[in-house]
Amino acid sequence: MGIIRSSIILRPYDTLLYATKIMIMEYVPKAIVTDEKGFPLGALTQKDIIKFVYEKGEEISFDKVYVSEVMRKDIVCVNESIDPLEAAEIMIDKKQPLLVVCSDDGKALGMIIKSDLTQYYASQIRGLQKTEEYMTSPAITISKSDSLINAVKTLVEKDVSRLIVVNEDKIEGQLTTTDLLYMAPAIKYKECKINVSEVMSPNIIVVDAGEDLASAAKLMASRKIKGIPVVKGDKLAGVITTTDVTRALLDDRVRKYLYEIKMYTSTF
């Protein structure tokens, strides 16, 4: 299956207001920034926006900040024939949230994000790895009564995209950069009185630590989410994310598994 997706294209002179609105309306976590000829200049993610707004505070105005001020410029361009395992290796080794897929003349054709590699894993692999082998543990948690600003501070300082919301050791939901993007204008006010409970995504699914990693990957792919809390019994054990699944693709067992499947199917 293909791992390349089309991308929303932003220009460096687009405003942060425009970029935020279009990412919300199109429900996309990331976008490519190009010049008028289609050559990539950078990328913009939800996390980039949240971090920028939180750090700049009340001094910024969304309609006066340009995408060029917020975007990341350390992008990696790859050819459209790239192998999924090679894409995973580049993303993990270079700590890239996305890969820009470019034509032979260097123009942006699309992008690959970790959700695409998670979907690839879900479609190709079964019974090879357990969720607990690759989950991030411990999960970073926050109380539903905590302030939104405190939650954003934790996300920025820990450099994560989600917090698990707990109440007396019970999982109540999670707060993600997707949730926060809707609240971006409020984040710049450090005295904001909004609580986590008013913004979080409630009633979330969980996976057991002993579950096949492919099942967790399939859940993330089908529900279009990037992370799921992991439990052992009734206790929170960690969180499994698209980054973790992408990291799992680097395991030699995966390469061997895919090779054996290819050799088996090629005999028919």
Image: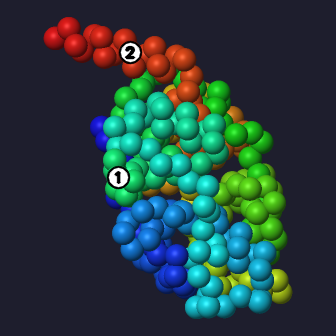
The one nearer the camera, 151 or 24, is 24
Q: Which residue is mark 1?
A: 105
Q: Which amino acid type corresponds to the residue marked 1 in the rendered image? A: Asp
Judged left or right of residue 251, residue 254 is left
The N terminus is located in which quarter? top left
Contact (CB < 8 A) between labels 1 and 2? no
Q: Is residue 154 above or below residue 35?
A: above
Task: Please identify the residue farthest to the left as the structure is shown.
Answer: 268
Comparing 131 with 268, the one in front is: 268
Secondary structure found at label 1: loop
Residue at 64 percent across and 32 percent down: it is: 134
Using the rendered image of the protein, determine whether residue 235 is visible from the camera's viewpoint. Answer: no
Q: Position of residue 136 (x, y in %)?
A: 70, 40
User: In the image, what residue occupies the spot 54% across and 17% down?
Assistant: 252
* Residue 151 position by quadrant: bottom right
Q: Nearer the viewer, mark 1 or mark 2?
A: 1
- Residue closest to the eye, 74 or 25: 74
Q: Which element carries disc 2, helix, strand or loop?
A: helix
Q: Position of residue 230 (x, y in %)?
A: 64, 41
Is residue 55 shown left or right of residue 2?
right
From the image, which quarter does the C terminus lie in?
top left
Task: Give the spatial CA distance, label 1 vs label 2.
Answer: 32 Å
Q: In the figure, is residue 26 to the left or right of 91?
A: left
The label on residue 14 is: none
Instruction: List the residue tagged with mark 2.
Output: 259
Count the labels in the image. 2
The quadrant holding residue 95 is top right
